[in-house]
Image (cartoon, rainbow, N blue to C red):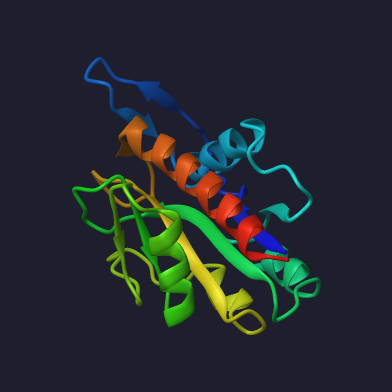
Amino acid sequence: MLVISCHADTGFQAHSLTHRADGIIQGHLDNFAGVQAVMQAYFSGRLAGGHVRIELTYGEETDFAGAYDVLETLSPDDTVLVVDVSGAETDNDFTIEKCKAAAMRAFVREALGGLAYDLYEGCPDPLSDVDEVEVYKQVCPRICFVGVPVFGGDYNAGQVLCRPQSIASVTEALCRLAEAYQRAKP
């Protein structure tokens, strides 16, 4: 199974989202941007076929309780994509982080040819290197973090900025990864 995990629990006292005149999205984007990309992928119809499971988790900001609930349902044969925002500096549309397994990196490169992304074995995010990957890697070696780049501050503390193209590109990446996964499975 291909599992797409995305936390939907960030709780600021007040939320805001603005589409600025320069095209940039400004707001409380942790993890609005990730949820938006996942839902756009889901509603695209390109995740059909019964091989993809989407998990919108809770507790990511505190104790990863939702991820631990999901962990109980995973097997070592599953592939997991954790979608969240990233503070990693990039000129590309998105990042693939914590992609340690060589086979997973090869799978990602094959599936995402032509898209503008950075691929890292580790975590270049200067704001946080702890996320749901730490939970799921206990069972699943085929795992990576798909990061929607945000900038202009600490995404854990308040409003940040994001290019709409980044959300659209993560949506496309998720669709391509799901399609490649389906082709690779018998």
Residue 80: give x, y in percent of width and height: 60, 66
> Does residue 124 appear to the left or right of 175 in the view shown?
left
Question: What residue appears at the point 33 percent right and 47 percent down from the top-left corner?
Answer: 115
Specify the quadrant that holds the N terminus: bottom right
21 or 176: nearer the viewer: 176
Eyeballing the image, is 9 above or below 79?
A: above
> Does residue 181 appear to the left or right of 73 in the view shown?
left
For the question of whether residue 4 can be seen, the reply is no
Specify the quadrant that holds the C terminus: bottom right
Quarter of the rendering containing residue 180: bottom right
For the question of whether residue 85 can be seen, the reply is yes
Q: Residue furthest top?
A: 21
169 or 18: nearer the viewer: 169
Quarter of the rendering containing residue 89: bottom left
> Does residue 132 appear to the left or right of 145 in the view shown?
right
Residue 106: give x, y in percent of width and height: 42, 71
Eyeballing the image, is 104 above or below 23?
A: below
Residue 41: give x, y in percent of width and height: 58, 38
Eyeballing the image, is 22 above or below 90?
A: above
Quarter of the rendering containing residue 138: bottom right
Question: What residue appears at the point 38 percent right and 22 percent down from the top-left corner?
Answer: 18
Q: Residue furthest bottom?
A: 138
Question: What residue appears at the point 44 percent right and 63 percent down from the top-left corner?
Answer: 108
Q: Residue furthest left?
A: 91
44 or 151: nearer the viewer: 44
Residue 84: give x, y in percent of width and height: 48, 53
87 or 49: nearer the viewer: 49
> Does residue 18 appear to the left or right of 179 in the view shown?
left
What is the tally of numbered marks visible in this picture?
0
